[in-house]
Image (cartoon, rainbow, N blue to C red):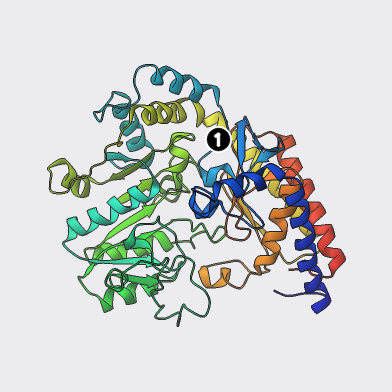
Amino acid sequence: MSVSATEPGLASIDELIGAQEQIFLRRQPRSTELIAVAGEHLAGGATSNWQIAQPQAVWMSHGSGSKVYDVDGTEYVDMHGGYGASIAGHAHPAIVAAVSERVRRGTHFAQPTEDAIWIAGELARRFDLPLWRFANSGTEATMDAVHLARASTGRDLIIKVEGCYHGHHDSVQVSVLPEADEIGPRSNPNGVPGNSGIPRAIRDLVVIVPFNDPEAVARALRAHRSRVAAMTLEPIMMNAGIIPPADGYLAAIRDLLHADGALLIYDEVKTGFTTGPGGITARSGVTPDLVCLAKALGGGISVAAIGGTRDVMGLIADGRYEQVGTFNGNPLAMAATRATLSEVLTPERYAHLDAMSARLRDALEATIAQYSFAWHVVTAGAKGCVTFRPDPVLEFRDFLEIDARLGHLHWLMQHNGGVFLPPWGKVEQWLLSVQHTSEDVDRFATNFARFAAVLADTGASS
């Protein structure tokens, strides 16, 4: 992090964080009470470790349209979006109608319903992949993709991008958010366990490469010739802000993998539908062998999908690979998904998302220019982030150089100003929904301008 003043400026950022955390806590006495009660029987006092923010988790009451409301009754413009799931916003009439009608007719049979046929056909059209199956979370989808790749090729190794998160199953819990002192040389990155409880034998099956570097993929394939089943990656890297692929990168790695008999897997759990009707698969024109979808697919209901070529998905069709799950194709999830794809994520709504994204980006860039800060805004469809460094982030190692305090302070000031964002400052992105308005994005922009002005007073620029 570069500064225009020196240590006093940095110290004042820490002081600002402390002051904003106190405001945060004063606004949420009921959340504080619930955390104390929850800790008795709910491990960690929350339902996921990723809900535990600093200084405390925020307990929610309800959502409506573009807004959410915490248990203290405070209203927020929701740009958290359930980590990218809530592109429909909250209580969208089409989804409410579909789910309400379906719930009266039974919510679970462990048998297919007709909506699944329509959805599979629509996904085939949007992603140009002919065969589909459903699951219940992004983790399940990426797990099936890895299994399918290994079953299809008869190989064990997986190439994974350093810093990418693909869910919490063992095969991909390697080098998810490693620390700078763990990663090793760029030419041969260490496979750092992404959690406790990941066996060394599993980590040894994962080969780590940097993002945006086809030559690193070529080296990995040469070092493990005819042993790599697939490479899995987010075609736009998330969970490290937003890192776009360089021109030609996706096509280059596809060609390298196919030349070695390996497969290409896109994890579009975050980018699917938020970046366009057919995700990055459609935008890039580079179609993978397998694609994984979840989050925005169900409009707020838990659902996932995996699609692929006839060669690979044929293993499911003829029984060589058993893709199973009691809740796969659950009728409630299928009803919500069909409504999302047919009535929510329409061309008109995508045009609205583009307009809201451009309005917000322009406002943020104007503020950054006003203060001559060395930051830049990155957007990808309905998603966006501010990168608090002067140079573009091309891979995870660039991302590690960003001072996390700026992201945390920004998150606190947005929250205290009535905008709800994912709590991991520099890691996460905002999400716009089809129900956001110009007034909503202007609230974000106003908070950002206040954040920039306060930082300018500290003498810290980036």
Residue 53 x, y percent position in the rendering: 61, 55
- Going by the numbered disc 1, the residue's amino acid type is Tyr
189 to the left or right of 397: left
Check the picture and name the quadrant holding the N terminus. bottom right
Residue 237 in view of the camera = yes
Residue 162 x, y percent position in the rendering: 44, 68
Secondary structure of residue under mark 1: helix
Check the picture and name the quadrant holding the C terminus. bottom right
Task: Check the image and report above or below for 4 versus 303.
Answer: below
Report which residue position mark 1 lands on. Answer: 350
Q: Nearer the viewer, residue 81 or 285?
A: 81
Residue 261 x, y percent position in the rendering: 21, 63
309 to the left or right of 278: left
44 to the left or right of 2: left
At 83% from the left edge and 76% from the top edge, which residue is drawn? 8
Q: Nearer the viewer, residue 232 or 74?
A: 74
Task: Check the image and report above or below for 265 versus 382.
Answer: below
Residue 263, quarter of the rendered image: bottom left
Residue 289 in view of the camera = no
Residue 313, quarter of the rendered image: top left
At 57% from the left edge and 71% from the top edge, which residue is drawn? 400
Residue 123 x, y percent position in the rendering: 36, 36
At 39% from the left edge and 31% from the top edge, which residue is drawn? 333
* Disc 1 residue crowd, few under 14, some 14–19, many 20+, Cα 10 Å: many
